[in-house]
Amino acid sequence: MKKILVVNGPNLNMLGIREPDVYGKRTYKELVSYVKSAAKELGVKVKCVQSNSEGKLVDLIQNAFGRYDGLIVNAGAYTHYSIALLDALKAVGLPTVEVHLSDIEAREPFRRTSYISLYAEKTIVGKGFDGYKEALDYLCETKTV
Ligand code: DQA
């Protein structure tokens, strides 16, 4: 059975409370349940992790090496400036899909830059929770996983 690690970055633990007009009213806990049930349907194993700390996120990505077949990454604001996260993804070399709940292309100009995109095979934006399901579908379909 394929194993996918879902890595969520800073402030995503505040889902449901933070800017509901942008990110919706559902909580992080609901996101985890949503991802787990989508994974169950697809017959893949999934683990969801979240951290507000850049270094911790680097550790989580590094620890995926040899343990997971693919990554789904929503790096939150680190997306827009973290070379450390980009390097961690390059180091582990796992198939990776970048997900954003909101449409980062249609917001402030600083959100249009993504360091994660420089590595990720695919980027899904603006689809809310469904973006994570689409990412799981993609990783299940790719032969490299
Ligand atoms: C986000 C978009 C980022 O710009 C923002 O900093 C986030 C959430 C999203 O899921 O839409 O924290 O990654």
Image (cartoon, rainbow, N blue to C red):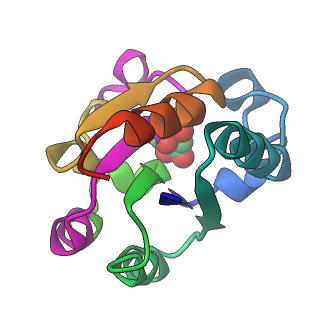
Number of numbered discs: 0
* Residue 80 vs residue 122, the one in the foreground: 122
Q: Is residue 15 visible?
A: no
Q: Is residue 120 visible?
A: yes
Q: Position of residue 12 (x, y in %)?
A: 65, 52
* Residue 132 vs residue 13, the one in the foreground: 132
Q: Position of residue 11 (x, y in %)?
A: 64, 56
In the rendered image, the vertical position of residue 110 relative to residue 65, given as above or below: above
Q: Residue furthest front?
A: 1
Tell me what residue is drawn at x 25 percent, y 73 percent.
88
Give the quarter of the image for residue 75: bottom left
Give the quarter of the image for residue 34: top right
Residue 106 included in the magenta stretch of the image: yes
Tell me what residue is drawn at x 62 percent, y 67 percent.
49
Tell me what residue is drawn at x 51 percent, y 76 percent.
53
In the rendered image, the vertical position of residue 81 relative to residue 52, given as above or below: above
| Image-based side of 86 in relation to 97, left or right | left
| Image-based side of 144 in relation to 71, left or right | left
The magenta span reads: 86-111
| Image-based side of 16 in relation to 3, left or right | right
In the rendered image, the vertical position of residue 7 relative to residue 98, given as above or below: below
* Residue 96 vs residue 101, the one in the foreground: 96
Residue 96 included in the magenta stretch of the image: yes
Q: Position of residue 122 (x, y in %)?
A: 28, 34
Tell me what residue is drawn at x 43 percent, y 21 percent.
107
Q: Position of residue 38 (x, y in %)?
A: 69, 37
